[in-house]
Image: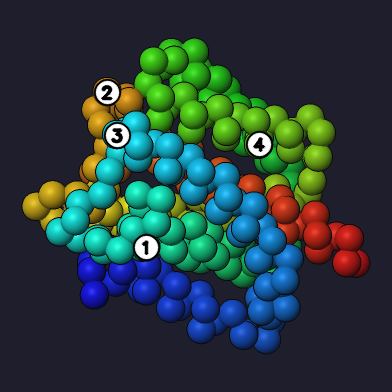
Amino acid sequence: MTLYAWLMLISIAGPLALSFDKKVAFYKQWKSLSIGLLVNAVLFIAWDIWFTKQQIWGFNPAYSSTLKFWGLPIEELSFFIVVPYASIFIYACLKAYLKRGIYTQLITWLNVIGMLVCLVAMVAFTTKTYTLVNTSIAFVLLAAHQFWLKKAYMAYFWIAYFVHLLPFVIINGVLTGAVTPSPIVWYSSEHIIGLRLISIPIEDFFYALSCLLLPVTVMEALLSKQH
Protein backbone atom coordinates (compact mmCIF):
# COMPACT_ATOMS: atom_id res chain seq x y z
CA MET A 1 0.00 0.00 0.00
CA THR A 2 1.32 3.46 -0.85
CA LEU A 3 2.26 6.10 1.70
CA TYR A 4 -0.58 8.30 0.45
CA ALA A 5 -3.04 5.41 0.98
CA TRP A 6 -1.74 4.84 4.51
CA LEU A 7 -2.29 8.51 5.30
CA MET A 8 -5.90 8.33 4.15
CA LEU A 9 -6.50 5.13 6.12
CA ILE A 10 -5.04 6.62 9.30
CA SER A 11 -7.05 9.81 8.82
CA ILE A 12 -10.42 8.04 8.53
CA ALA A 13 -9.94 5.21 11.05
CA GLY A 14 -10.44 7.19 14.27
CA PRO A 15 -13.34 9.43 13.18
CA LEU A 16 -15.16 6.49 11.57
CA ALA A 17 -14.82 4.29 14.67
CA LEU A 18 -15.93 7.11 16.98
CA SER A 19 -18.90 8.09 14.81
CA PHE A 20 -21.07 5.79 16.93
CA ASP A 21 -20.33 7.60 20.19
CA LYS A 22 -23.71 7.99 21.92
CA LYS A 23 -23.41 11.71 22.65
CA VAL A 24 -22.12 12.73 19.22
CA ALA A 25 -24.05 10.05 17.25
CA PHE A 26 -22.39 11.26 14.07
CA TYR A 27 -23.76 8.31 12.12
CA LYS A 28 -27.25 9.83 12.40
CA GLN A 29 -26.03 12.75 10.26
CA TRP A 30 -24.58 10.57 7.50
CA LYS A 31 -27.43 11.15 5.06
CA SER A 32 -27.09 14.95 5.15
CA LEU A 33 -23.33 14.67 5.43
CA SER A 34 -23.08 12.50 2.30
CA ILE A 35 -24.74 15.19 0.21
CA GLY A 36 -22.44 17.83 1.65
CA LEU A 37 -19.43 15.66 0.87
CA LEU A 38 -20.70 15.07 -2.66
CA VAL A 39 -21.13 18.81 -3.36
CA ASN A 40 -17.68 19.46 -1.94
CA ALA A 41 -16.10 16.61 -3.93
CA VAL A 42 -17.64 17.69 -7.24
CA LEU A 43 -16.23 21.22 -6.89
CA PHE A 44 -12.78 20.32 -5.65
CA ILE A 45 -12.20 17.26 -7.84
CA ALA A 46 -13.05 19.36 -10.91
CA TRP A 47 -10.58 21.97 -9.66
CA ASP A 48 -8.02 19.23 -8.94
CA ILE A 49 -8.28 17.78 -12.44
CA TRP A 50 -7.78 21.19 -14.03
CA PHE A 51 -4.85 22.12 -11.76
CA THR A 52 -3.16 18.80 -12.47
CA LYS A 53 -3.51 19.29 -16.22
CA GLN A 54 -2.09 22.80 -15.88
CA GLN A 55 0.87 21.45 -13.86
CA ILE A 56 -0.01 23.72 -10.95
CA TRP A 57 0.54 20.64 -8.81
CA GLY A 58 1.19 16.96 -9.33
CA PHE A 59 1.71 13.62 -7.59
CA ASN A 60 4.85 11.67 -6.89
CA PRO A 61 4.51 8.11 -8.30
CA ALA A 62 6.92 6.88 -5.62
CA TYR A 63 4.28 7.50 -2.94
CA SER A 64 0.95 7.31 -4.81
CA SER A 65 -0.87 4.73 -6.89
CA THR A 66 -0.46 4.34 -10.63
CA LEU A 67 -4.21 3.64 -10.77
CA LYS A 68 -5.64 6.96 -11.93
CA PHE A 69 -8.97 8.47 -12.89
CA TRP A 70 -9.04 11.75 -14.82
CA GLY A 71 -5.30 12.02 -14.19
CA LEU A 72 -5.68 11.77 -10.39
CA PRO A 73 -4.33 8.90 -8.25
CA ILE A 74 -7.06 6.93 -6.49
CA GLU A 75 -5.78 8.20 -3.14
CA GLU A 76 -6.29 11.79 -4.25
CA LEU A 77 -9.93 11.07 -5.06
CA SER A 78 -10.40 9.46 -1.64
CA PHE A 79 -8.92 12.61 -0.07
CA PHE A 80 -12.13 14.53 -0.79
CA ILE A 81 -14.18 12.08 1.26
CA VAL A 82 -11.70 11.16 3.98
CA VAL A 83 -10.38 14.58 4.98
CA PRO A 84 -13.72 16.47 4.98
CA TYR A 85 -15.33 13.56 6.89
CA ALA A 86 -12.63 13.65 9.57
CA SER A 87 -12.81 17.46 9.76
CA ILE A 88 -16.61 17.55 10.06
CA PHE A 89 -16.41 14.86 12.74
CA ILE A 90 -14.40 17.33 14.82
CA TYR A 91 -17.10 19.93 14.16
CA ALA A 92 -19.83 17.49 15.25
CA CYS A 93 -17.97 16.65 18.48
CA LEU A 94 -17.64 20.32 19.36
CA LYS A 95 -21.36 20.85 18.74
CA ALA A 96 -22.15 17.92 21.02
CA TYR A 97 -19.85 18.86 23.88
CA LEU A 98 -19.64 22.67 23.81
CA LYS A 99 -22.25 25.33 24.43
CA ARG A 100 -22.15 28.31 22.09
CA GLY A 101 -21.71 30.91 24.80
CA ILE A 102 -19.14 33.59 24.08
CA TYR A 103 -18.08 31.93 20.83
CA THR A 104 -21.16 33.25 19.05
CA GLN A 105 -20.01 36.81 19.72
CA LEU A 106 -16.78 36.15 17.83
CA ILE A 107 -18.42 35.05 14.57
CA THR A 108 -18.53 38.49 12.95
CA TRP A 109 -14.95 39.32 13.94
CA LEU A 110 -13.59 36.05 12.59
CA ASN A 111 -15.66 36.26 9.40
CA VAL A 112 -14.53 39.82 8.70
CA ILE A 113 -10.88 39.14 9.50
CA GLY A 114 -10.97 36.06 7.27
CA MET A 115 -12.58 38.01 4.44
CA LEU A 116 -10.04 40.84 4.72
CA VAL A 117 -7.09 38.44 4.64
CA CYS A 118 -8.57 36.75 1.57
CA LEU A 119 -9.23 40.07 -0.13
CA VAL A 120 -5.69 41.32 0.44
CA ALA A 121 -4.26 38.07 -0.95
CA MET A 122 -6.60 38.20 -3.96
CA VAL A 123 -5.46 41.73 -4.82
CA ALA A 124 -1.78 41.25 -4.03
CA PHE A 125 -1.27 37.90 -5.78
CA THR A 126 -3.53 37.96 -8.83
CA THR A 127 -0.88 36.19 -10.94
CA LYS A 128 -0.58 33.27 -8.52
CA THR A 129 -3.30 30.88 -9.66
CA TYR A 130 -3.41 28.62 -6.60
CA THR A 131 -3.39 31.61 -4.26
CA LEU A 132 -6.09 33.47 -6.17
CA VAL A 133 -8.48 30.53 -6.54
CA ASN A 134 -8.09 29.45 -2.91
CA THR A 135 -8.65 32.87 -1.41
CA SER A 136 -11.51 33.66 -3.80
CA ILE A 137 -13.49 30.56 -2.79
CA ALA A 138 -12.84 31.16 0.90
CA PHE A 139 -13.86 34.81 0.53
CA VAL A 140 -17.16 33.93 -1.18
CA LEU A 141 -18.04 31.34 1.47
CA LEU A 142 -17.26 33.68 4.36
CA ALA A 143 -19.10 36.61 2.74
CA ALA A 144 -22.16 34.41 2.16
CA HIS A 145 -22.27 33.55 5.85
CA GLN A 146 -21.58 37.07 7.04
CA PHE A 147 -24.06 38.95 4.85
CA TRP A 148 -26.65 36.40 3.82
CA LEU A 149 -26.84 33.14 5.76
CA LYS A 150 -25.85 34.56 9.18
CA LYS A 151 -25.89 31.16 10.88
CA ALA A 152 -25.05 30.58 14.54
CA TYR A 153 -23.29 27.31 13.66
CA MET A 154 -20.38 29.45 12.43
CA ALA A 155 -19.27 29.62 16.07
CA TYR A 156 -18.68 25.87 16.00
CA PHE A 157 -17.20 26.06 12.52
CA TRP A 158 -14.49 28.49 13.60
CA ILE A 159 -13.59 26.46 16.68
CA ALA A 160 -13.51 23.29 14.56
CA TYR A 161 -11.36 25.02 11.97
CA PHE A 162 -8.68 25.99 14.49
CA VAL A 163 -8.83 22.62 16.29
CA HIS A 164 -8.55 20.65 13.04
CA LEU A 165 -5.41 22.56 12.06
CA LEU A 166 -3.35 20.24 14.28
CA PRO A 167 -4.17 17.01 12.41
CA PHE A 168 -4.24 19.03 9.19
CA VAL A 169 -0.64 20.17 9.69
CA ILE A 170 0.47 16.60 10.45
CA ILE A 171 -1.24 14.97 7.45
CA ASN A 172 -0.58 17.80 5.02
CA GLY A 173 2.97 18.09 6.27
CA VAL A 174 3.60 14.49 5.25
CA LEU A 175 1.87 15.06 1.91
CA THR A 176 4.06 18.06 1.13
CA GLY A 177 7.37 16.46 2.05
CA ALA A 178 8.03 17.24 5.71
CA VAL A 179 9.24 13.69 6.43
CA THR A 180 10.11 12.28 3.00
CA PRO A 181 12.97 13.02 0.60
CA SER A 182 10.46 14.40 -1.90
CA PRO A 183 6.80 15.40 -1.48
CA ILE A 184 3.83 13.17 -2.24
CA VAL A 185 2.09 16.23 -3.69
CA TRP A 186 4.28 18.89 -5.29
CA TYR A 187 3.35 22.49 -6.15
CA SER A 188 4.61 24.66 -8.99
CA SER A 189 6.48 27.63 -7.54
CA GLU A 190 5.00 29.82 -10.27
CA HIS A 191 1.48 29.50 -8.89
CA ILE A 192 1.98 29.91 -5.12
CA ILE A 193 3.31 32.73 -2.97
CA GLY A 194 6.13 30.55 -1.69
CA LEU A 195 5.45 31.15 2.00
CA ARG A 196 5.24 27.81 3.82
CA LEU A 197 4.62 26.49 7.32
CA ILE A 198 7.14 23.69 7.63
CA SER A 199 6.54 22.24 4.13
CA ILE A 200 2.89 23.33 3.72
CA PRO A 201 2.10 26.19 1.30
CA ILE A 202 0.24 28.93 3.18
CA GLU A 203 -2.56 28.70 0.60
CA ASP A 204 -3.48 25.25 1.92
CA PHE A 205 -4.87 26.85 5.08
CA PHE A 206 -7.46 28.68 2.96
CA TYR A 207 -8.10 25.42 1.12
CA ALA A 208 -8.72 23.67 4.45
CA LEU A 209 -11.19 26.38 5.43
CA SER A 210 -13.25 25.96 2.25
CA CYS A 211 -13.12 22.15 2.38
CA LEU A 212 -14.64 22.28 5.86
CA LEU A 213 -17.08 25.17 5.48
CA LEU A 214 -18.72 24.11 2.20
CA PRO A 215 -19.84 20.62 3.30
CA VAL A 216 -20.82 21.92 6.75
CA THR A 217 -23.03 24.54 5.10
CA VAL A 218 -24.80 21.96 2.93
CA MET A 219 -25.14 19.49 5.80
CA GLU A 220 -26.55 22.08 8.21
CA ALA A 221 -29.04 23.31 5.60
CA LEU A 222 -30.35 19.77 5.13
CA LEU A 223 -30.43 19.05 8.87
CA SER A 224 -32.42 22.24 9.52
CA LYS A 225 -35.02 21.14 6.95
CA GLN A 226 -35.33 17.77 8.67
CA HIS A 227 -36.02 19.45 11.99
Q: Earlier in the sequence, mark 2 or mark 1?
A: 1
Q: Classify mark 3: residues with Cα within 10 Å, few (<14), some (14-19) or many (20+).
A: some
Q: Nearer the viewer's eye, disc 2 or disc 1?
A: 1
Can you see residue 16? yes
Q: Nearer the viewer, residue 39 or 91?
A: 39
Q: Can you say whether 30 is above or below 80 in the image?
A: below
Which residue is rendered at x = 36% and y = 52% of the image? 72
Q: Quadrant of residue 90?
A: bottom right
Quadrant of the rendering where the N terminus is positioned: bottom left
Q: CA distance from mark 2 to mark 3?
A: 10 Å
In the rendered structure, find residue 172 and report the number of the disc placed on it: none
Q: Earlier in the sequence, mark 3 or mark 1?
A: 3
Which residue is rendered at x = 64% and y = 48% of the image? 214
Please state the horizontal and vertical placement of residue 182, each as a whole percent of the image. 13, 49
Query: Which residue in the protein does label 2 denote?
Result: 190
In the rendered structure, find residue 55 and report the number of the disc placed on it: 3
Q: CA distance from mark 2 to mark 4?
A: 26 Å
Q: CA distance from mark 2 to mark 1?
A: 26 Å
Q: Can you say whether 57 is above or below 63 in the image?
A: above
CB-based contact (under 8 Å), mark 2 and mark 1: no
112 left or right of 123 in image? right
Please state the horizontal and vertical placement of residue 152, each as a whole percent of the image. 78, 49
Q: CA distance from mark 3 to mark 1?
A: 18 Å
Which residue is rendered at x = 36% and y = 63% of the image? 75
Q: Classify mark 4: residues with Cα within 10 Å, few (<14), some (14-19) or many (20+).
A: some
Query: Which residue in the protein does label 1 denote?
Result: 74
